[in-house]
């Protein structure tokens, strides 16, 4: 008889599920590493945002002759408010993903990043040109026509950098640096989203694996118990009913004999003992007790087997 609570196919499917969860949990070190990198980047962005706001309000507040802040805006407090803005922006995005603040920041970041990069490019170009790169492209005096005044000390490229490129670099870079606070808020929000997703994924993988291993242990234990009970049931089914009734009847006769032994002993002692006429009467009649014992002893093994027969049990 097959004593399998689950079919082999079901056990193989569950083992495949456990193996898949084990492989998924094996990626936990990588997820932890990515989470640590994201946490470090988030901390860096937060410190940059802190420093930007702190320096701005420290400059606006100014200092007295004693070196104490003369402004009514405390730089440290305002820097903390920037971190509060990051947290508030992230929570608002979680509660209402498509909110107005999110749309404005996302649109502004696309422009501010471009302005910052253009400003840096202009500034680098101006610095390189001023430090000597302009001499490599300077127009020689021998190329000038006779109608041009030889007193011209500046080429047209110098004029372009002085009149256009330098002011443009300062303006665009200033806008980019001013928008860096907004960019930091956007970057911090995205890092928080990624970090939260990785932590949730990690906890989910571990919890699912633990639940699967626990269920697997329960299944194996239940399977063993079911198989053991099946074997015991087969052993009971294999026994002959006649042998079972014979064993029960023999046990009944043995119990009766054991129960009658103290009474037979009392009758034997009473028969050999002499009774004085001054003694009280016996609590039991020896003759009646001997008759009762004889009737009980008359119950034979066949009588018990007959009482245990299916017909007799059905009548009862």
Image: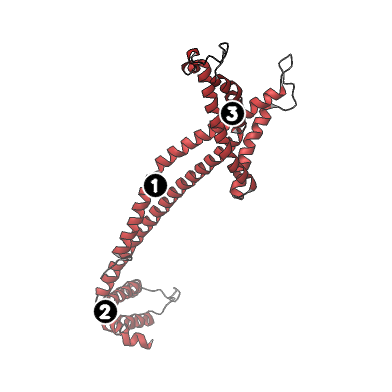
Q: Between residue 192 and residue 260, name the one nearer to us.
A: 192
Residue 126 position by quadrant: top right
Residue 224: % across, % down: 32, 61
Eye-nearest disc, 2 or 3? 3
Q: Between residue 199 and residue 207, name the one nearer to us.
A: 199
Residue 269 shows in the view: no
Q: Tell me if 61 is positioned left or right of 248 in this view.
A: right
- CB under 8 Å between discs 2 and 3: no
Furthest residue to the front?
147
Q: Tell me if 59 is positioned left or right of 143 in this view.
A: right
Give the total of numbered labels: 3
**How was the colour assigned to the protein in this rendering?**
secondary structure
Secondary structure of the residue carrying numbered label 2: helix
Secondary structure of the residue carrying numbered label 3: helix
Residue 216: % across, % down: 36, 56
Q: Between residue 133 and residue 72, name the one nearer to us.
A: 133
First-in-chain label (2 vs 3): 3
Judge whether 98 appears above or below 11 on screen: above
Rendered image: mark on residue 241 = 2
Q: Which residue is mark 3?
A: 173
Q: Which residue is mark 1?
A: 25
Separation of marks 1 and 3 at Cα, in angstroms: 47 Å
Eye-nearest disc, 1 or 2? 1
């Amino acid at each position: 008889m097959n004593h399998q609570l689950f079919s082999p196919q079901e056990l193989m499917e569950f083992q495949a599920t456990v193996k898949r969860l084990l492989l998924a949990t094996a990626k936990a070190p990588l997820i932890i590493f990515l989470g640590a990198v994201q946490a470090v980047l988030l901390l860096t962005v937060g410190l940059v945002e802190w420093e930007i706001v702190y320096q701005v309000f420290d400059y606006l507040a100014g200092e007295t002759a004693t070196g104490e802040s003369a402004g009514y805006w405390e730089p440290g407090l305002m820097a903390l408010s920037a971190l509060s803005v990051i947290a508030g922006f992230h929570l608002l995005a979680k509660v209402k993903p498509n909110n107005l603040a999110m749309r404005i920041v996302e649109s502004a970041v696309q422009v501010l990043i471009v302005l910052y990069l253009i400003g840096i490019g202009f500034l680098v170009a101006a610095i390189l040109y001023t430090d000597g790169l302009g001499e490599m492209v300077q127009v020689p005096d021998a190329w000038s026509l006779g109608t041009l005044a030889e007193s011209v000390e500046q080429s047209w490229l110098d004029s372009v950098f002085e009149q256009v490129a330098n002011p443009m670099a300062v303006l665009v870079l200033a806008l980019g640096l001013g928008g860096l606070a907004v960019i930091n808020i956007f970057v911090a929000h995205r890092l928080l989203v990624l970090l939260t997703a990785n932590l949730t994924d990690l906890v989910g993988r571990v919890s699912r694996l633990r639940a699967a291993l626990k269920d697997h242990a329960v299944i194996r234990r239940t399977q063993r118990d079911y198989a053991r009970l099946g074997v015991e049931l087969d052993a009971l089914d294999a026994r002959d009913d006649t042998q079972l009734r014979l064993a029960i009847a023999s046990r009944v006769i043995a119990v009766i004999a054991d129960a009658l032994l103290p009474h037979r002993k009392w009758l034997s002692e009473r028969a050999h003992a002499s009774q004085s006429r001054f003694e009280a009467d016996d609590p039991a009649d020896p003759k009646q007790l001997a008759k009762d014992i004889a009737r009980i002893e008359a119950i034979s093994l066949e009588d018990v087997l007959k009482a245990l027969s299916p017909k007799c049990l059905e009548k009862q």
